[in-house]
Image: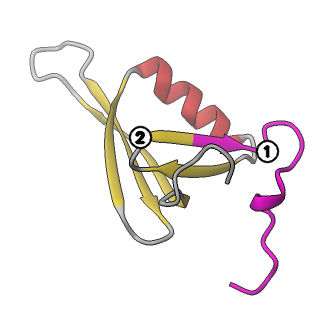
Amino acid sequence: MPGASDQTQPVKILNANWIPDTNGGDGRFDIMIVTEDDQRHELPASAASVTAVVALAQAGTVMMWDPPNRVLIAANVVGQMPWTVRDGSS
């Protein structure tokens, strides 16, 4: 995929976890990504970034994770990239 490392994988599972603050504060968020190669990645996230990631995931985008660059790619926001089309051979 253009601009991504050769370790970039499709996202199989995307979870947003909220950890409450025991003192009544806002708590914190983590995003958990599991890629098609079954690798698990956990990232701290703000409430605003979780909102944006969830919206992109629900919009029918193709989500890809580039571990070395720590980049979550949301493809096909408008149009369709050729590398996101499965040929049925997998």
- Residue at 47% in and 62% down: 35
Q: Answer above or below: position of 16 versus 67.
A: above
- Give coordinates of residue 75: x percent, y percent: 72, 44
Label for residue 76? 1
**Could you tell me how far apart the alpha carbons at marks 1 and 2 are, in whole angstroms?**
19 Å
Image coordinates for residue 72, horizontal then vertical, percent: 52, 41
Image position of 4 (left or right of 50): right
Image quadrant containing the N terminus: bottom right
Q: Earlier in the sequence, mark 1 or mark 2?
A: 2
Question: How many residues crowd around disc 2 within 10 Å: few (fewer than 14), some, or many (20 or more)?
Answer: few
Farthest residue in the right direction? 79
Residue 41 relative to residue 21: left or right: right
Label 2: which residue?
70
Q: Is residue 58 above or below residue 23?
A: below
Range drawn in magenta = 73-90
Residue 88 within the magenta-colored segment of the rendering: yes
Can you name the residue that lies furthest to the left here? 23
Q: Camera-side residue: 6 or 83?
A: 6
Q: Amino acid at mark 1?
A: Asn
Q: Residue at x 44, y 48 (%)?
A: 15
Secondary element type, mark 1: loop
Q: Position of residue 4 (x, y in %)?
A: 57, 47
Report crowding for label 1: few under 14, some 14 to 19, many 20 or more residues within 10 A (C-alpha).
Answer: some
Q: Secondary structure at mark 2?
A: loop
Q: Is residue 81 above or below residue 30?
A: below
Which kind of residue does numbered mark 2 sit on? Arg
Q: Quadrant of residue 38?
A: bottom left
